[in-house]
Amino acid sequence: MSAGHEAAARRSWEIMRGLVLDHDRRKDVSDALGMSFLKAKALRALTQEPATLRVLAATLAVDAPYATIIVDDLEGRGLVTRTVHPEDRRARLVDLTPDGRVAAATADRMLSEPPAVLRELDSGRLRALEALLSALVAD
Amino acid sequence: MSAGHEAAARRSWEIMRGLVLDHDRRKDVSDALGMSFLKAKALRALTQEPATLRVLAATLAVDAPYATIIVDDLEGRGLVTRTVHPEDRRARLVDLTPDGRVAAATADRMLSEPPAVLRELDSGRLRALEALLSALVAD
DNA sequence: TATAACCATTGTGTGGCTACAACCATTCCG
DNA sequence: CGGAATGGTTGTAGCCACACAATGGTTATA
């Protein structure tokens, strides 16, 4: 690997990192939903299917007590339901309420909104960029 | 702007965001330096030139009391000096010590390290990616 | 059946960060 | 010159996230 290759990788990384961190919407999501980003993340984690507290804790990379606190809060806001798991009375099943689903969608929408510079890039370049990035993560 | 264009922008953003957030070294920097990322960020902010506490607070986007706490800690670790500003006795000038400069360089090195997928991209694609990203931020 | 493991809950403690109040010394400006 | 503004410091309060301990009920297993 040549020095030029290394420099290009670093430069590319620097730009990407700068873009993403300068356009970090996590605080906006927190403000919009009125909750910590982790709680918003919990809602988003539940959009596909309900989860037990243990699974949710693992998904959020938090310990069980904290998962309980998070779900306590979300339940209190009417965004999730917490029921006894049908197959294991020790477990709880956490599922989104309709309001919770709306909140999760809001967060998703905000997080998926690309910065203007991307949207303003000309079509040829954007397509090329998308292809290169897709190849990058396909490996 | 066509639907395809919007989708390409979103997809590109999603990939970039995923890459950067999955390769987030901030915790590693904190662990390596034994301090919060904000403190490491303060050190890095001082590499170009000394700053007053007010400027440092603005750079870090924290309020004055918290900037004081940050600098207190860094000073206590021997990583910065805090002197009365030569032109305004109300102000303090915060500068890196040699140790502080080493710590800042460590953080910079860690943060600038691109992920393997970037380094492993073939030269042609990497060069193209770098050019597209550079054009993106040149606008 | 007894023991171990699992799941969730309750509780304590800590560091990081944010917001804000109050104060003192210094500088600016009318 | 006096009042206002500025820069930094000290202090309080609260939320967030993380770590860990302990508990009780349930399930699995030897």
Image: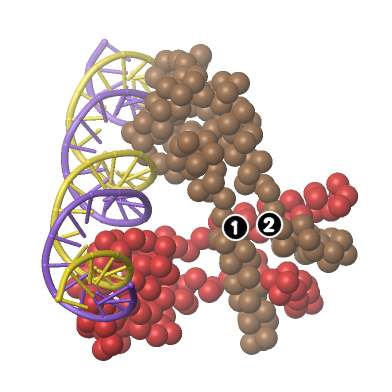
Chain colours: A red, B brown, C yellow, D purple
Disc on the earlier residue, 2 or 1? 1
Q: At 48% across and 64% down in the image, what residue appears?
A: A25
Three-letter residue code for mark 1 = His
Residue that numbered label 1 is attached to: B23
Q: At 45% across and 62% down in the image, what residue appears?
A: A26
Three-letter residue code for mark 2 = Pro
Against A61, is B85 above or below? Answer: above
Residue that numbered label 2 is attached to: B115
- Please state which of residues A84 and B43 is positioned toward the viewer in this rendering: A84
Q: At 40% across and 41% down in the image, what residue appears?
A: B62
- Using the rendered image of the protein, determine whether residue A1 is visible from the camera's viewpoint: yes
Against A138, is A16 above or below? Answer: above
Q: At 69% across and 71% down in the image, what residue appears?
A: A137
Q: Mark 1 — on which chain does it sit?
A: B
Q: Mark 2 — on which chain does it sit?
A: B
x, y (%) of residue A118?
66, 69
Q: Which mark is residue B82?
A: none
- Using the rendered image of the protein, determine whether residue A115 is visible from the camera's viewpoint: no
- Direction from residue A14 to residue B26 in the image, left or right: left
- Direction from residue D3 to residue B30 in the image, left or right: right
x, y (%) of residue B103?
58, 31
